[in-house]
Image (cartoon, grey):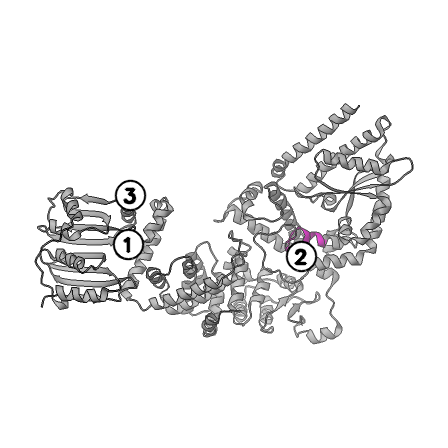
Amino acid sequence: MRSSKNKTNVKLKEDIAKCKESLKGQFIKLGGRNYGIYQAKEIDKFLKSAFDIVKIDSFGEFILSDDSVPLCVAAIGSYALGEMSVKSSIDLAIIYKNELGYNSKAIAQRYLQILKNVGLDIEAKLYEQDELSVICDDIELAVLFSHIRLVCGSKILYKNIKTHITQINKNKKDELIYYHLNKLEPMSCPHYLDCSPNLLNGSGGFMDYKRAFWLFSLFGGTLKSNALKYIDENELSEMNLAFDYISSLRSALQISGGGEILGREYLDSVTKIMQTKAKKGLSPQEILLSKCLWAMHTIYIYSRYLARRAFGVRISLGTARICRLSNGIYNIANTIYVPSCKKPKDFELVLKELSLLPDVELAFDISALIYIKRLEDSSSTKVYEGLKKILNRKHSKDILKLLLDSSKLLKIIKPMEFSSHLASLEGEYSLDESCIAVVGELESIEDKFVFSLYADLCANGKMLLKLVALMHKASINHTSSANIFRSYCAKLDLMQKTINMGMNLIKNQNQLIDLLSEPINESAMLSLVSSIKEKQALKLLYILSYARLKAKNSHPFSIAQNAKLRQIYDSALNAFDSDENLIDIISKRTKKIELLKKQKEFISLDKQIKDRILAIESNLLFLKYTQQQIIDIALKANDCSNINLELTSHSVKIITKSSWNMAMVLWELRNLDLAYMEIFELFDGKSYIRLDYNSKIENSQNQIIQALCSKDNPQCDKPVILSNEIGFDMNYSQNYAKLNINSKDQRGFMVYILSMLSKFQIKLANARIQTIKNRTRNVLLLHIEDKLKGKIDQFLKEIITE
């Protein structure tokens, strides 16, 4: 007999283990739908099997029917409702009645032990029927017992228990209502949703829906029958769909090894289990997070609205008289309430009313949100006038958030539809909410200097910044977002100059922020100003960048970052005073780099090589050569340990360390007619040199390499160079001085110049020498050093012919 019972126990344990292993496959098979019901039914089977085992254990061949045993097993909590996730606790109440002919408590304890032995993860407690009054003293326990379902055991005992618990809930009705309402506070527009949400207890999570369910169940009837008194079929359907999605997502997350928080580390696995596909240029992870945030937002607003409507807002008659506005809404301590009896108006008129609210920070009760949400959309151009009036307020953020939460902002600013509930995988707010957060930071600037810049702006300038903040994420890339901005702004009747400025800001929106992680140098600043082009654009971009960094919720804006952002702004402002020619060169370099980054060959390179290429300071290299040529030169330089020399009939190309002796190379080739010469610094102390001759080169590679490595100084005649043929700019750039020589071509000319630079220990960084019609045109960039000014004066004095 004992052997037979042991086999039964082992079989049950094996069945439970198989069920656990098949959870993922079953979830995928069901597509996540009704998964909680499936799981509850499976658990019911195991509990009933265990009950049969305990009856055999207790009564042997005198086994009784379930109703003849003074014991019942009741599901409570989410298990009772079939709303479990994979890791939800199996909440059980094992209730027995002390009768003289039974050892009921021992049977209940034995049953509990069997459940643990076979591997069921249960949260179970034993209760004697008369001990159930303990529920009266524990509100959490009362909530758990608010729904109870018989799994197995005595139906007679369960019926008595059910009657008893119903009476307890009736007696605690007011306390339970207060408990659930308190958990749903604040009943106002939702704060920004977390992009790593808690699916159980977060704003709009599983428990928010359940609280609305529990509140209505206290009055009898179903959630549907009660809810339809306050919301329509479509709204209820939307709420239920959102709840179903969150329920499925919880199980998918827990199958992936997570708990209740949808962290980034689980996204790949969860999207596969939920069978989420990429769409419209968005990854499966982005699609899943977006749908999750939509669901939580939907649950948040309807659960609170149902609670608000069912239990009302208590406003005293005196308060109502004082706080009622002329349009029939209430402003109580700067929180706006809309009574349920208020009739809908034209949306453009409501926008006007919103713009006329006190220009202070406001809060909007959930009743105001639903009222706005239910208004008919309007195609009238007056809505754009209403939007402009709202943006021109000192405090517009709260009204914009109300319009966003009601989906009306997406109707007024259609380009924002792209960012609706679209989560940032970096952990920020959703993109649409982050746009509102930026507007909020613009309206509450803490930094005194940034505030002074913002305060100096005209009303149009401030409105433009808010518009850019709202629309800077209108597409996947900045250029597309800028074009969308231009198209939309035609509806707002803005001046073309204002629209162009907005496009400039959107195209360059990340320029200052990206520089926070980079060293501040002249090249970066010149690249920045060449992109922005206007000082006013730099000022606006600085204010906008400050607000965007302040609005981040996952990485708080530090004092050090703020200081560096100011340093970048000041440096860029100074860079606007640089040589216009240099700014133009940097602009062309920037465009070339953008093209380079798109090259397949560049994309396939190691990050280290990419960084080295982009860090090459020689602008002329980027201007003169194609993207492929730049990659080829960089790869050769990277592989070059000493000297790389290519010799053709009319050209010499050299990559070598900066200790090269180019004067001797030119001396070695002095009998040839030099047509063109260039020298570019690369990286790791290496330079690229190119010599082009009009005549054929007879010298060998070895002769050129020997000259390059020579320690000798060539002996050559001094050419005639007149003072008016030389131009020198000590302030050409932060790192370089510029020397121009436009003189008559003379044999040995560059041999002499390079020898003299070596004599005065003046370091040559870049050079371009070209001979056209017997005149040599030389552009030499010299490294700025502490003593360069004194050296150059002596150098010029010696090379100029008296």
Q: Nearer the observer, disc 1 or disc 3?
A: 3
Q: CA distance from mark 1 to mark 2?
A: 58 Å
Residue 488 visible in the picture = no
Q: Is residue 202 magenta?
A: yes
Q: The C terminus appears in which quarter of the rendering?
A: bottom left
Residue corresponding to mark 3: 639
SS for tag 1?
helix
The residue where tag 2 is placed is: 302
Left or right: 310 with respect to 715?
right
Give the CA separation, mark 1 to mark 3.
20 Å
Assign a secondary structure to mark 3.
helix
In this orientation, which residue lies closer to the viewer: 774 or 419?
774
> Is residue 658 one of those drawn in magenta?
no
First-in-chain label (1 vs 3): 1
Q: Is residue 240 above or below residue 121?
A: below
State left or right for residue 443 relative to residue 746. right
Q: Earlier in the sequence, mark 1 or mark 2?
A: 2
| Residue in the picture at 35% in, 65% down | 533
The disc labelled 1 sits on which kind of residue? Phe
Magenta stretch, residue numbers: 201-212
User: Which x, y percent locates residue 14?
Assistant: 68, 30
User: Which residue has dot 1 on it?
Assistant: 622
Compare marks 2 and 3 and give the one earlier in the sequence.
2
